[in-house]
Image (tube, rainbow, N blue to C red):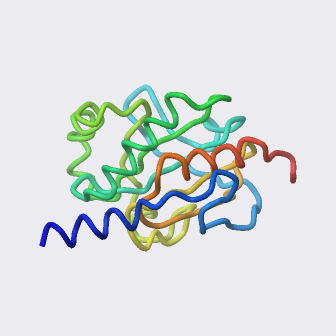
Amino acid sequence: MFASWWAVVGAACAVAPPTQLPEGRVQASRPVEFSFPANQDEVVSSETTRGRATVLAFVTTYDVASQLVLLRLGEVIARFVPRANAAAIVIEPPLYAELLPAYRESLALPFPVVMADFATQQGHGAFGQIASVPTLVVLDRDGREVWRHQGPLTAEEIENVLRHASRRSGGS
């Protein structure tokens, strides 16, 4: 059983050529308006992320693939130039919100981990239906969604998409 699991993980982690974006690219539209409270003093929102490319990782805390993607996203964000934003949006019942600081600390994530609001959990939020976890949504510097992908990605794939989003602005 474990051998087949590792085969699936290995196949899912195949590296795309450095100049190619992984599947999942979407047509940029108008800026997405969203707001997820991180804690009493911090908010992850369209206002706080505007001006930099942003990766929003929709995850659950109990999913191994979500944890893997968050670790890889953390590696990319820590070294990415120009600076970019990232946040983990946890799609779980609000009663687990008090566990998020421990989750963030245990994975040593350099970005906020926040709870999805009720509308997002129901598929009616600013990002529409999140059909599976992990799902990465990438916004350009103007806050327009330019890419969405379900499932695991390599750090290199995340970096390629983030580099593309960092260059996009003003309808380019």
The N terminus: image quadrant: bottom left
Q: Is 103 left or right of 124, judged from the image as shown?
A: left
Residue 24 x, y percent position in the rendering: 60, 67
Query: Residue placed farthest to the left in the image?
Result: 1
Q: Nearer the viewer, residue 168 or 19?
A: 19
Q: Residue at x 56, y 57 (%)?
A: 137
Up the image or down, 41 lies above or below 67; here it is above
Q: Nearer the viewer, residue 165 or 38?
A: 165
Residue 48 x, y percent position in the rendering: 60, 34
Q: Nearer the viewer, residue 108 or 92?
A: 108
Residue 146 x, y percent position in the rendering: 69, 58
Instruction: Report which quarter residue 85 is drawn in.
Output: top right
Instruction: Report which quarter residue 133 is drawn in.
Output: bottom left
Q: Residue at x 32, y 58 (%)?
A: 65
Q: Residue at x 21, y 56 (%)?
A: 62
Up the image or down, 160 lies above or below 3; here it is above
Q: Nearer the viewer, residue 100 or 152?
A: 152
Q: Is 166 left or right of 102, judged from the image as shown?
A: right
Q: Is 88 left or right of 33, judged from the image as shown?
A: left
